[in-house]
Image: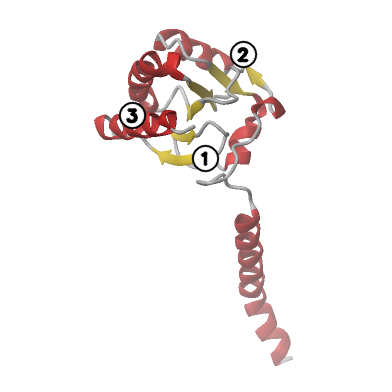
Amino acid sequence: MEYIIIWSRIKPLVLAVLVGFLTIGLHEASAKVVEGDTFPDLSNFEFEGEVPEIEGKVVLVDFWASWCAPCKASFPAMERLYQEFKDRGFEIVAVSVDDSAAAYSRFAKRSGATFPILRDLGKKLVATCAIEAMPTSFMLDKSGRVHAVHQGYAGKKTDEQYKREILALLAKD
C-alpha cells in the first residue's frame, strides 16, 4: 500500500524527467546548419519569388521577417553590399519567414532592395537550418559551404564583418 502511495506521488516527476531526456535527445538530433557545412540546395524548397543562380558565387543567405526591427535595419546595408559586389560574383538571397504573403510583399516593396527576396513557403528551409533568431544569415563560399553564421544585426559592426568576409571569399579561387 505504501508503495502505491509513493508511486502515485513520484510518477509525475519520473514522467517529467523521461520526457525531458527525450526532448533533449530530439533537440540534439535536429539538423542545424553550422560553419563548414554545405548549405542546403535551394531547389529542394518551395519559395514565393524567383530563386537566383548561386552556383560558384559568394552568397549571403539572410533569414528575416517583416515584423523584425533589426531585419528592417539590415536591408539598406545589404543593398549597399549587393551593389558594390554583385558584379564580382556576390549574391544575396533574403528569405522571409513571414506567414502572411501580404506582409512579405509589403516589406519587400518598401525595402527598395534589388537583390532576390523570397518567402519560405511552409518554412521548410527555416526548419532545416534550425533558425532560432531574426535575422540570421549564412555567408557561403563559392562552393556553397557555410563560411560564417551571423545571428542578429549590430549595425556598422555587422556591415564591416560582412564586407571583410565577402572580400576574403571573393579573393579565393
SS type, badge 1: strand
The residue that mark 2 highlights is: 50
Closer to viewer: mark 2 or mark 1: 1
Residue under the point 36% across and 27% down:
69
Q: Position of residue 50 (x, y in %)?
A: 61, 13
Lower position in the chain sequence, tag 2 or tag 1: 2
Residue 20, disc: none
**Image quadrant where residue 42 sits:** top right
Circle 2: is it few (<14), some (14-19), or many (20+) Cα within 10 Å?
few
Q: Position of residue 86 (x, y in %)?
A: 44, 16
Check contact, mark 3 vs mark 2: CB within 8 A: no
Q: Position of residue 92 (x, y in %)?
A: 48, 22
Distance between mark 3 and mark 2 Cα atoms: 25 Å
The residue that mark 1 highlights is: 146
Q: Position of residue 24 (x, y in %)?
A: 60, 62
The residue positioned farthest toward the front in the image shown: 173
Residue toward you, 77 or 161: 161
Residue toward you, 144 or 60: 144
Distance between mark 2 and mark 1 Cα atoms: 22 Å
Residue under the point 60% across and 58% down:
28
